[in-house]
Image: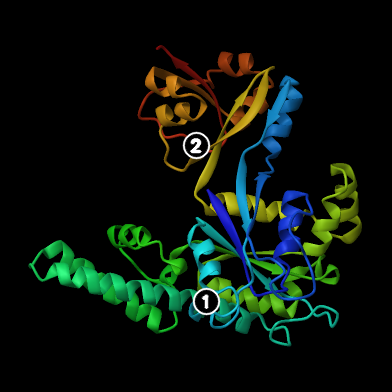
Amino acid sequence: MKLGIIGLPNVGKSTLFNALTSSRTAESANYPFCTIEPNVGIVPVPDERLDVLAKMYDPEKYTPATIEFVDIAGLVKGAGRGEGLGNKFLANIRESDAIIHVVRCFDDDNIIHVDGSVDPKRDVETIEYELIFSDIELLERRIERTGKMSKSGDKKLLAEVKLLERIKTHLEEGKTVNSMDLEPEEKAYADSLFLLTSKPVIYAANISENDLADPFECKYVKELSEIAKAENAEIIAVCSKLEEDMSELSEEERKTFLEELGAESSGLDKLVKASYALLGLISFLTAGPKEVRAWTIKKGTKAPQAAGKIHSDFERGFIRAEIVAYNDLIESETYAKARDRGLVRSEGKDYVMQDGDVTVFRFNV
């Protein structure tokens, strides 16, 4: 699962990517299109539960969950017609499972804005319209192809054409597929089209250090918040440049630095956690002296399929899952005490895994 980091040129995408990956692999410069080929990075998901379990078990190995971020080239008006990096940019977005839309929310005369001024509403519309234009073009081809096939009178195809035309009309009104009120079956079909505006979105408001203590008092962040609210999207405020600088500090130094700035926690950590949730992902945990680890699964995954994440034999020979909720384990202090208190449950093949389940799988092959 990967998230594409998008936005206009010079809004801080590559700086944010460098902070996320604790690297300097993405070029960051004061001119448009300094990123051409997308940069890819694997980023650990912050999880305080693993830290607590690590203290409990003192394991040889500590393995957090990870997600993949892709730093995609900046978009300008006319991308769908080949302006800037055009269709190459759009193709990179299409390959992503979700989108981090970076929007500039700070003034700085030393950093060029591609449109000459800071205006979150205009900037978001520039990006969205290009995604919408691309989706309309794809839908027109799909409608033509499905329409020809539906002439046989096939009711399923006729219903598909009707839905395709409805989606196209919605897009032509300047609205994204995400904002449509679709039935579950319609939503599943729309998702199968891989439309750009149907991808889940988090807005990353790139703020200045001066707004770090209370970012949602910044006028630009307020504007962006209204846009996010209308789209049922999440917004995270993050100072990309500061986060990039902090990525070189130790954990303790970062904590002290944030306290001095009056910030409760890193915007970057909030963004990574929100990204994980945006993809519909949760973690079940395994813990012991050899390894403490978070395993990534989709919400709704049943126990045998979760076991298969560890090894295919675990799924093939699944007998049961022995599970204790994380909070119950911590309150009990040890796994043995949790078992004595009756908090370790034996779950079968139909059990749906929950976030934070501390699990031992029993299997026989």
Quadrant in the rendering for residue 47: top right
The residue drawn where x is 90% and y is 53% is: 257
Q: Is the residue marked by circle 1 packed among few (<14), some (14-19), or many (20+) residues within 10 Å? A: some
Q: Amino acid at mark 1?
A: Glu
Q: Amino acid at mark 2?
A: Gln
The colouring scheme, among rainbow, by chain, secondary structure or one colour, is rainbow
The residue drawn where x is 67% and y is 27% is: 330
Q: Which mark is residue 77?
A: none
What residue is disc 1 on?
128
In this picture, residue 95 sits left or right of residue 247: left
The residue drawn where x is 54% and y is 74% is: 86
Q: Does residue 24 lie above or below 298 as drawn?
A: below
The residue drawn where x is 68% and y is 84% is: 119
Q: Secondary structure at mark 1?
A: helix
What residue is disc 2 on?
354
- Nearer to me, 70 or 263: 70
N-terminal of the pair, mark 2 or mark 1, is 1
Q: Position of residue 270 (x, y in %)?
A: 68, 54
Q: Position of residue 90 (x, y in %)?
A: 51, 68
In this picture, residue 196 sits left or right of residue 106: left
Q: Does residue 62 lie above or below 208 as drawn?
A: above
